[in-house]
Image (spheres, rainbow, N blue to C red):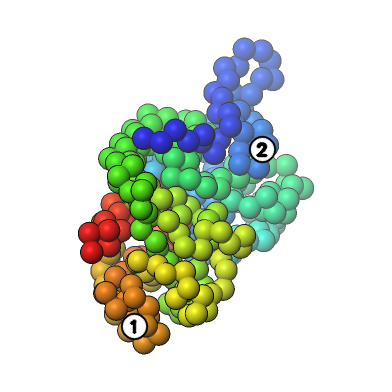
Amino acid sequence: MRVVVGFFLVVLAVGCGSAGAAAIEVIDDNGHAISLAQPARRIITLTPHVTEMVYAAGGGARIVATVTASDYPAEARALPRIGDGVAPDPEKVAAYKPDLVVGWLASQADALEALDIPVFINAPRLLDDIPDSIETFGILLGTSGVARTRANELRHKLEALAPAATAAQSKPVRVFVQSGTEPDYTLGADHILSDVIGLCGGVNVFADSPMAAPRVSPEGVLAATPDVVIVGRQGAVAGAPDTAALAYWKSVGLPAALAGRVYAFDADTIYRPGPRLIDTAPQVCNVIRQARKS
């Protein structure tokens, strides 16, 4: 297993040794210390991946409201909504009387600063950050037993994939990620899917882009010479041939398409930095392994 410094620099569970001392203190991805006198009981999640992690950590019943796109697990679909979460409305948030809000952008914390409610920022950049994050939610929610079990399950899955990266160091498979149903955008190196590709023995052909979602042209993709195309498509079966993208890339003469190596994956699963991304990583590794054998 690769040794990767987790996204949390410090995670502390501090005992109440003196009057007024915090029971729980953690450092979030915004570099801010979040202190709670006791485990959170009323949570608002401002992004779908956090909703998934809170459920994985055993705290789903603590969520009192979430954002429009939170649709997994199935229980999350019944939760009250406060909008898209990008610019949270302080009045809507305050109405649910949360003792913790969890988002993924620093601007979300800024928008809610006047409420004097702890806002914890969770933005995993690497696969190893996902189990670390789940354990941290266990500390915040007082559900460490459940959270630790799920986190360790995910770590074991990552350990099982590590040999793929080692075996492919001499010649990584080149992967183009088509972000969306139209072939106009891709993902840069900062997206966590690039870490999945690397763990599977591949390399994102647009990893050098400074943009999170750079626009691409057919000529640019041809010049990048990918061996595999991965397409994010809502509801797709992981690793199934993507007939629409295959036909398009064949029409422009992309060698990967001419060889039939264009595959669909459920967009929410591969774009959200949550447990399902690790669960589906073996299917990503499988299409990369097939390309290496070709």
Q: Which residue is mark 1?
A: 250
Badge 2 element? loop
Q: Which residue is mark 2?
A: 31
Measured as percent of width and height from the top left, residue 111 is found at 72, 54
Q: Residues within 10 Å of mark 1 (few under 14, many from 20)?
A: some
Q: How many marks?
A: 2
Closer to the camera in the image, 88 or 214:
214
Q: Is residue 214 above or below residue 73?
A: below
In the current view of this chain or complex, which residue is farthest to the front?
Answer: 170
Quadrant location of residue 247? Answer: bottom left
Residue found at x 68% / y 15%: 19
Measured as percent of width and height from the top left, residue 72 is found at 39, 57
Quadrant location of residue 226? Answer: bottom left
In the current view of this chain or complex, which residue is farthest to the bottom?
Answer: 251
Residue found at x 56% / y 73%: 215
Q: Residues within 10 Å of mark 2 (few under 14, many from 20)?
A: some
The mark lying in front, picked from 1 and 2, is 1
